[in-house]
């Protein structure tokens, strides 16, 4: 099983620059794989870099059948992250939940970095959409101090800062 770690930069938070927020640890437990406990989500993976997409420019002519491709460039895509947010008690769970939501929604631009064993993937990201699900994980999830699952949909640049994706 690979070692997974990562962080979200927090230097652009409006209240002042903060240190990077470590993710995929005992506080932000990644939810991986397709499981029967999954809430509605765009992804059943703990980390989903998103599907690539392109922007095309087509030329139309009344004298040529169809259209002709003039230009194309990669378009932004969406990075999906899923976590089971933990804490010593419900107040701490809520605080930890607020911390990661703030890191992903209050910054105009930030980076998300994920390291799988020795390969690091870093993406330039923009304000995220999130979904907190009070489903079976909340009530019957693994371990004590487990809070609700958090699903993040994060718009990202098509070209990574680091990594081949």
Image (tube, rainbow, N blue to C red):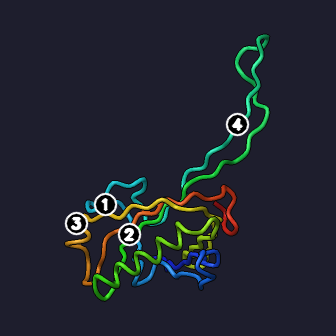
Mark 3, residue position: 136
Please tell me which residue is depicted at 42% across the width and 53% down the height of the picture: 42
Question: Would you say 145 lies left or right of 33 here?
Answer: left
Image disc number at residue 56: 4
Mark 2, residue position: 31
Q: Quote the CA–CA distance across marks 4 and 3.
A: 43 Å
Which sits earlier in the primary sequence, circle 4 or circle 3? 4
- Please rate how many residues cluster around mark 3, counting C-alpha atoms within 10 Å: few if below 14, some from 14 to 19, many from 20: some
Secondary structure beneath dot 3 equals helix
Q: Quote the CA–CA distance across marks 1 and 4.
A: 35 Å
Mark 1, residue position: 38
Please tell me which residue is depicted at 77% across the width and 25% down the height of the picture: 59
Which sits earlier in the primary sequence, circle 1 or circle 4? 1
- Please rate how many residues cluster around mark 2, counting C-alpha atoms within 10 Å: few if below 14, some from 14 to 19, many from 20: many
Q: Quote the CA–CA distance across marks 3 and 2.
A: 13 Å
Secondary structure beneath dot 2 equals loop
């Amino acid at each position: 099983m690979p070692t997974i770690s990562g962080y979200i930069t927090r230097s652009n938070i409006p209240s002042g620059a903060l240190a990077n927020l470590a993710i995929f640890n005992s506080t932000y437990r990644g939810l991986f794989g397709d499981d029967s406990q999954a809430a509605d989500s765009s992804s059943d993976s703990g980390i989903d870099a998103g599907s690539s997409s392109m922007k095309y420019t087509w030329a139309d002519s009344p004298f040529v059948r169809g259209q002709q491709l003039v230009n194309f460039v990669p378009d932004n895509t969406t990075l999906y992250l899923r976590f089971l947010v933990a804490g010593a008690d419900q107040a701490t769970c809520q605080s930890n939940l607020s911390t990661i939501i703030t890191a992903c929604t209050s910054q105009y631009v930030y980076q998300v970095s994920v390291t799988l064993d020795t390969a690091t993937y870093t993406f330039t990201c923009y304000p995220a959409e999130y979904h907190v699900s009070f489903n079976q994980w909340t009530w019957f999830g693994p371990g004590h101090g487990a809070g609700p699952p958090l699903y993040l949909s994060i718009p990202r640049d098509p070209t990574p800062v680091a990594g081949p994706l």
